[in-house]
Image (cartoon, rainbow, N blue to C red):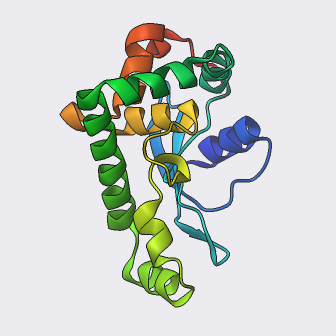
Amino acid sequence: MTPEQLERIEQQLGRTPRGLAEIAYQSPDGIPMVLRMASLVDDKPFPTLYWLCSKDLHKAISQIETAGWVKQIEHELEIDAELNARYQQNHRDYVDTRDRYMSRAQRQRITELGFSQLFQHYGIGGIAQWDKVRCLHMQYAHYLCGDGDNRNVIGARMEKEFSLSSIKILR
């Protein structure tokens, strides 16, 4: 991470980030879009692995949320067993990926603090109810950081329906 990228991230967030591990995804122009976060920050659990930092994407996704798309996709998860199964797998993959990024010392400290169960049960965006969609921003961040068939299905649907990758990322 360059000093310029860190400065850009601070501008995007409006503050200095806490628990920033790395830039997980950036635009072709080098603009940070998704941050990978540490699981433990100041001895407090932070189960959100991927944090969307692009203001442009944040604004577009907020409009999708405001339009009621979360309830629509949650309804589809209720009636479409295949979609739900893929979404459940996304949560399991997210938990596994988050665990792989933890160092032995981090994992030990999480255990000492009594947070181990939390990290096994909290999925994408720190949600415990895996049949719900907490935040489209985190779903799309997870999608951007995925690869192949394991990409986040909610993020993939957002891309298909709203062409978020075509948004000009300026900030």
Q: Name the residue furthest bottom.
A: 112
Q: Name the residue furthest front.
A: 79
Question: Which residue is nearer to you in this view: 54 or 142?
Answer: 142
Question: Which residue is nearer to you in this view: 39 or 21?
Answer: 39
Task: Judge from the rendering whether residue 149 lies leftward or rightward of residue 112; answer left or right.
Answer: left
Q: Position of residue 89 (x, y in %)?
A: 27, 45
Q: Is residue 157 above or below residue 47?
A: above
**If the image is split into quadrants, where does the C terminus sit?**
top right
Which residue sits at x=68%, y=60%?
18
Q: Is residue 1 visible?
A: no
Question: Which residue is nearer to you in this view: 56 or 117?
Answer: 117
Q: Is residue 150 above or below residue 162?
A: below
Which residue sits at x=53%, y=77%?
115
Task: Judge from the rendering whether residue 50 lies leftward or rightward of residue 93; answer left or right.
Answer: right
Q: Position of residue 125 (x, y in %)?
A: 53, 47
Query: Disc count in the image?
Result: 0
Q: Position of residue 137 (x, y in %)?
A: 57, 33
Which residue sits at x=54%, y=54%?
126
